Image (cartoon, grey):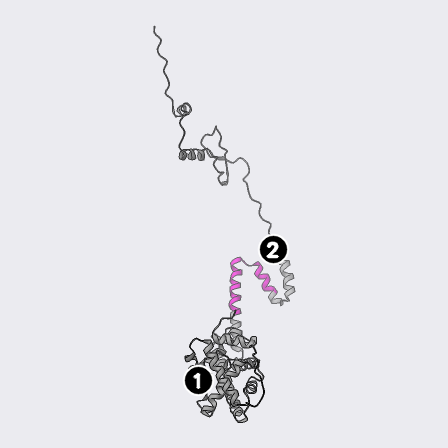
Amino acid sequence: MVPSPTPVPHPGPATAGVSQTSLQPIPTEQAMEDAMMRSSPTPEPVLGKRTRQVDGSTDGNDTEPDDGPPSTTQPQSLPSISNVAAATLRYVSKKKLRPEQRDEVDAFLLDTVLGRQAKLFACILSSENKIDTFRSAAPPYQLSDELKTNITNYGIAVLLSVNVSAYKGDIPCNHVLDILKRYRFDLPAGIEHDYANWEKISTFVGYSLTQTRARVKKLIKDSIKANTNIFSLAQMIVHSTPCRTTIQLCSRVALMRAVHAECNGGEKFWNLTDARLEFIRTRAGSSASKTARAFNEILKIDRATYGAAEEYVIGDTVPDEWQQRVDDVVAGIDIV
């Protein structure tokens, strides 16, 4: 009897993987295989269940009933109502609240969260009503004497600035208002947005500039009769102000006196002075040197006409910081 051949088993997937050691997985497959071999992250615990560690004898169930007591977090210790009430009582005593206010605080502590929020909102509305009542009862706004003094001094500085383009009209008035907005002084916050009260300030600025122009015009008229030199005339104009008597300031005053002599100080004096400024500005264009030469010539003629026999020197004085700030505002230069 011939023995039957022994059957050769066909290698399964696992057997083939062992016997065919020469086959190497491609990188993508290797990465997937590595990911599968890594242990899975522990899932979030579920109430009444706990994660079961996976090992070689796993039966496919991921969770099993938790035999032990459920894991609970330790509650944070909160201050008791009595402690809060005691601390609040000390704070109320420190703030010296009235008895009825203390009762309101006690009721507030015992209220619900929604109730406390509603009470806080009601208090905010009540405060707004009281503020509105206070504002309506306040007296009408009036310019202080300090503000009037600042407006007068800055008005003179604007009219004598080397950068001013006109002595009359809205231009100098707007420059003074810009200075007030920038440096505030004792202006109430946001008053420039209150049209009625801001109009009071604008009106006084215009009035102050009118008075300054009238005073300067009178000093120039008197200086022509008295044959006063330009340096003395400039000192009289800036008297009681922080302005310094510089060459540039004397040149501007000399321009005013030249126009005054031409029109004999008529009603159109300031209009003619503004026209002369415009003429110089147009002819000089953007050349600062041409403008300087024009004013130097005006100053030279004035010195030869008035007080020529007097010995005086106009020093090359640099404008102080106060006048320089004014010149920068008039020139539209932003100051940090």
- For disc 2, the marked residue is 81
Crowd class of label 2 (few under 14; some 14 to 19; many from 20; radius 10 Å): few
Can you give x and y, in whole percent of width and height, for residue 138 in the image? 54, 78
- 218 in relation to 331, above or below: below
Distance from label 1 to label 2 (Cα)? 83 Å
Give the mark count.
2
> Image quarter for residue 68?
top right
Magenta segment, principal secondary structure? helix
- 188 in relation to 68, above or below: below
Among numbered discs 1 and 2, the one appearing first in the sequence: 2
Can you give x and y, in whole percent of width and height, for residue 31 in the image? 43, 35
Of residue 101 and residue 170, the one placed in the foreground of this image is 170
- The quarter in which the N terminus is drawn is top left
Residue 107 part of the magenta-drawn span:
yes
In this rendering, does residue 215 appear at all? no
Asked whether the beta carbons under mark 1 and mark 2 sit within 8 Å of each other, the answer is no
Of residue 109 and residue 139, the one placed in the foreground of this image is 139
Instruction: Name the secondary structure under disc 1.
Output: helix
- For disc 1, the marked residue is 276
In this rendering, does residue 175 appear at all? yes
Crowd class of label 1 (few under 14; some 14 to 19; many from 20; radius 10 Å): some
The type of residue carrying mark 1 is Arg
> Image quarter for residue 17?
top left
Can you give x and y, in whole percent of width and height, for residue 150 in the image? 55, 80
Of residue 2 and residue 321, the one placed in the foreground of this image is 321
Residue 200's label in the rendered image is: none
* Residue interval drawn in magenta: 102-127
